[in-house]
Image: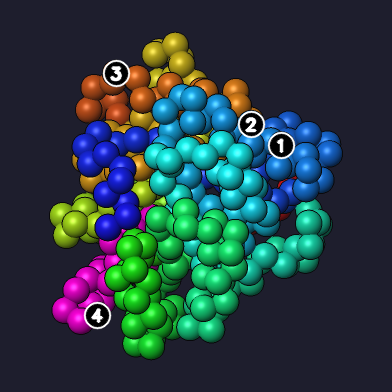
Amino acid sequence: MALDRLPNGAPMIGLGLAAVGRPGYINLGRAGDLPEDRSVPALAQRTHELLDAAYAAGVRYVDTARSYGRAEQFLADWLRTREPSDVVVGSKWGYTYTAGWRVDATVHETKEHSLATFIRQLAETRELLDGRLDLYQIHSLTPDSPALADTALHRALADLRDSGVTVGFSTSGPHQADTIDAALDIEVAGQSLFGSVQSTWNVLESSAGPALARARARGCRVIVKEAMANGRLACGAAPEPVAALAREQDTTPDVIALAAVLAQPWVDVVLSGAATVAQLHSNLAARHLALTPAQLAPPAELGEPPADYWQHRATLPWA
């Protein structure tokens, strides 16, 4: 399995490129995070700066997707110029970027989990990443996705798995746990189809935790996304319990949010979605934060019903 190139022990922080591969995204505070110039060259430069800083700090997992604008291209260019042999690359298929490099687009991405989309986007990813693809995931699988029952797609994914690329899936929405359990039951030729799962887990939305623990027990690598709830747990927006703990520990809320994920025994990788090098370095401080289990547990008063959390997320503007 390609993800075996990552150390199998203490959880680590990886770098996700969702926030810098396209000019518009739903993270809070982007006006201050990104330059006024959000042209392709400007965001390519920002992405390369982040990748350089992350690699220098020991980050070895990078997450991207077909729908992240030019993120795959930016990463491919960086890999070709830097030639790091030890970086593990994960990408995703299932969404198509449609915003035309505009922040004010009516539709930023369209979702289709069909065999035809998989074949097209795998070819596009391979053309860019050229032998550097380690993990390919179905993007935002949900219980109603046709990908869960499409046996022709399962066979195509198994062929990719058998070629040495780990096949995985990411989840979204209020029923992540149901999606995880359903996907883990899929087998092709007597072998589990999926070797990894990537889900949202944070101190506001922790409902997927038990299912992620079950996935890890069955041998899947677990990647956590949106640990800072699209900026809701970052500086200036963090709820008071998180902000208070950050003040007590002389750190910042993003560090608390990421440390809470790293403390979960089933986590392999938690993604930083940093848009600036300063944010990245702040996020990485979570690797060294020593808190008690009680301090790292999600405060009960912060938890939101999954339906409420995902409804709130759907109202966040693309900016």
Instruction: Specify whether residue 241 is in view.
Output: no
Which of the marked residues, 4 or 3, is nearer the chain's N terminus?
4
Residue at the image point whose x is 59% and y is 50% from the top:
76
Residue at the image point whose x is 78% and y is 48% from the top:
40
Q: Nearer the viewer, mark 4 or mark 3?
A: 4
**Residue segment shown in magenta:** 173-198
Q: Secondary structure at mark 4?
A: strand
Question: Disc 4 marks which amino acid?
Answer: Val
Q: Is residue 157 above or below residue 48?
A: below
- Which of 117 and 140 lies nearest the eye of the viewer? 117
* Colour treatment of the image: rainbow
Q: Position of residue 197 (x, y in %)?
A: 34, 58
Say which residue label 1 marks: 45
Mark 1 and mark 2 in contact? Answer it, CB < 8 Å.
yes
Give how far apart the Cα atoms at labels 1 and 4 are.
42 Å
- Which of 106 and 52 lies nearest the eye of the viewer? 52
Tag on residue 290?
Answer: 3
Q: Nearer the viewer, mark 3 or mark 2?
A: 2
Which of the marked residues, 1 or 3, is nearer the chain's N terminus?
1
Say which residue label 4 marks: 188
Q: Position of residue 151 (x, y in %)?
A: 34, 87
Give how far apart the Cα atoms at labels 4 and 3 are.
43 Å
Mark 3 and mark 2 in contact? Answer it, CB < 8 Å.
no
Q: Is residue 178 magenta?
A: yes
Question: Disc 2 marks which amino acid?
Answer: Glu
Residue at the image point whose x is 34% and y is 83% from the top:
155
Q: Is residue 122 above or below residue 13?
A: below
Quadrant location of the N terminus?
Answer: bottom left
